[in-house]
């Protein structure tokens, strides 16, 4: 199926060599804008609970606001993907950034005027997170129109590097800005979204998905995305594995934060431990292209899950030392390469006009179980210990490893996708399926 969108820098569709990503103006604009806005998002994710604590002096209320935001993102995820397949994806991204900037400016103004309350903070947080579940499917679905098909893995590895870099810098910056004034981090996040909107507006090309002859209901379009994911052996396998993997990773990271604090470790040291974990993901994104050239997705998945299971056990033994960050950081070395390979395969499988729905389905299902990670970790920390909590998440990762090894569908499905998208027979940038 030929794409109905084209962008500068994607490469000559007649077979000429693609433009390198570093000289691809469209990809540069998207990447730069997202580095800035991702950093702003991580700043705000630290500032929201800090502001709630300042307003209510209740850690429980801070947790409730965070949970409501997460639940809203899960609920809006599937409809958000369907909506991203209805409209011009570049305009959707600009609109999302503009709305987020506006509500964050309003929040900053209310904080400065001493007129803010915790329900207002919760509403702003939900709008901020809700816009994100519409922005991300649009950005992912637009990627094949910005870069050449052969560069999808490399482009998404760069996206992973961007996310880890933002998670490394954002929390520390958020704490610093909040110390300057409780309105400052929200004003900074608003500015980051305006920068993103400006860079996205500079991406040239047509990003409106191909329209069917008759527009169907939103519910029907969401169902189409779910059915396509389930019909694809590779994507079906991924939605069975990814929830366990994300549940385990998120649970271990949450456990480390709380367990270290329970043992009297200073917040600054805990921040350094979390930064060390993010460094592992950033390093993994840097080496991802080399790993992808040597290992197919199914082998990456096996090595990652087996290694993570063993390293989580090591982490459980090391706790409560801050050095617990080291084995967890090592587990993230393979994550970006595996994620990039999976997302690239997903974009090739999905028809162009359904990429938003397929992306949102994958993200929603893959991260849905992770919403239970803090609750699971908290209960185990309260009633047993941090070491047992990490051990429980190691068991979850071990189950994922057994599934990778014992079931042949991941290897067979990836081979089928590779054959269907062989560059000798497939159109550059085209979608399979």
Image (cartoon, helix red, strand yellow):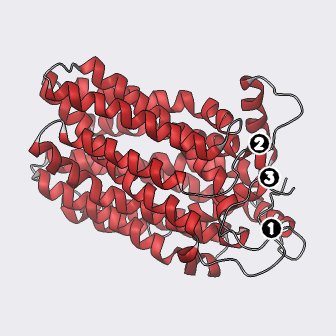
276 horizontally vs 340: left or right: left
Give the image quarter of residue 343.
Answer: bottom right
Q: Quadrant of the N terminus?
A: bottom right
Q: Does residue 357 appear in this view?
A: yes
Within-10-Å neighbours for mark 3: few <14, some 14–19, many 20+: some
Q: Does residue 389 appear in this view?
A: no
Sequence order check, earlier mark of 3 and 2? 3
Separation of marks 3 and 2 at Cα, in angstroms: 25 Å
Q: For mark 1, what is the residue?
A: 415
Residue 4 disc label: 3
Give the image quarter of residue 381.
Answer: top left
Residue 1 disc label: none
From the top left corner, tell me how far across and down residue 113 is, in percent: 14, 23
Identity of the residue drawn at 58% across and 57% down: 203
Q: Which mark is in front, 1 or 3?
A: 3
Q: Using the image, determine if residue 330 lies above or below residue 271.
A: below
Q: Are marks 3 and 2 in contact (CB under 8 Å)?
A: no
Q: Which mark is in front, 3 or 2?
A: 3
From the top left corner, tell me how far across and down residue 73 is, in percent: 49, 32
């Amino acid at each position: 199926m030929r794409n109905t969108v084209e962008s500068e820098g994607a490469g000559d569709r007649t077979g000429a060599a693609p433009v390198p990503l570093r000289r691809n103006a469209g990809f540069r604009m998207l990447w730069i804008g997202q580095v800035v806005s991702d950093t702003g998002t991580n700043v705000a994710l630290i500032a929201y609970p800090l502001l709630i604590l300042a307003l209510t002096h209740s850690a429980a209320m801070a947790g409730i606001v965070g949970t409501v935001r997460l639940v809203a993102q899960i609920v809006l995820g599937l409809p958000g993907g369907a909506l991203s397949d209805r409209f011009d994806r570049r305009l959707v991204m600009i609109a999302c950034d503009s709305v987020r900037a506006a509500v964050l400016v309003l929040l900053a103004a209310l904080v400065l005027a001493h007129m803010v309350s915790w329900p207002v903070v919760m509403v702003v947080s939900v709008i901020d997170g809700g816009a994100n579940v519409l922005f991300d499917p649009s950005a992912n679905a637009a990627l094949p129109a910005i870069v050449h098909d052969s560069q999808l893995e490399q482009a998404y590895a760069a996206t992973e590097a961007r996310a880890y870099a933002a998670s490394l810098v954002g929390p520390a910056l958020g704490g610093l800005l909040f110390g300057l004034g409780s309105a400052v981090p929200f004003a900074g996040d608003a500015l980051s979204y305006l920068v993103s909107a400006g860079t996205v507006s500079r991406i040239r090309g047509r990003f409106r998905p191909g329209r069917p002859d008759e527009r169907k209901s939103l519910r029907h379009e969401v169902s189409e995305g779910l059915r396509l994911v389930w019909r694809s052996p590779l994507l079906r396998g991924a939605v069975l594995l990814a929830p366990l993997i994300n549940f385990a990773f998120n649970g271990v990271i949450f456990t480390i934060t709380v367990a270290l604090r329970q043992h009297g470790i200073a917040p600054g040291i805990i921040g350094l431990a979390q930064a060390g974990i993010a460094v592992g993901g950033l390093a993994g994104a840097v080496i991802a292209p080399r790993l992808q050239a040597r290992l197919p997705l199914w082998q990456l998945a096996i090595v990652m899950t087996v290694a993570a299971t063993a390293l989580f056990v090591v982490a459980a033994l090391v706790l409560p030392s801050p050095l617990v960050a080291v084995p967890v950081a090592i587990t993230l070395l393979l994550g970006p390469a595996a994620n990039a390979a999976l997302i690239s395969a997903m974009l090739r499988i999905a028809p162009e006009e359904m990429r938003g729905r397929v992306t949102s389905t994958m993200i929603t299902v893959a991260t849905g179980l992770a919403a239970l990670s803090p609750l699971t970790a908290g209960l185990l920390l309260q009633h047993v210990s941090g070491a047992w909590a990490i051990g429980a998440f190691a068991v979850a990762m071990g189950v994922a490893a057994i599934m990778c090894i014992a079931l042949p569908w991941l290897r067979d499905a990836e081979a089928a996708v590779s054959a269907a998208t062989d560059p000798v027979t497939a159109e550059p940038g085209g979608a399979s399926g």
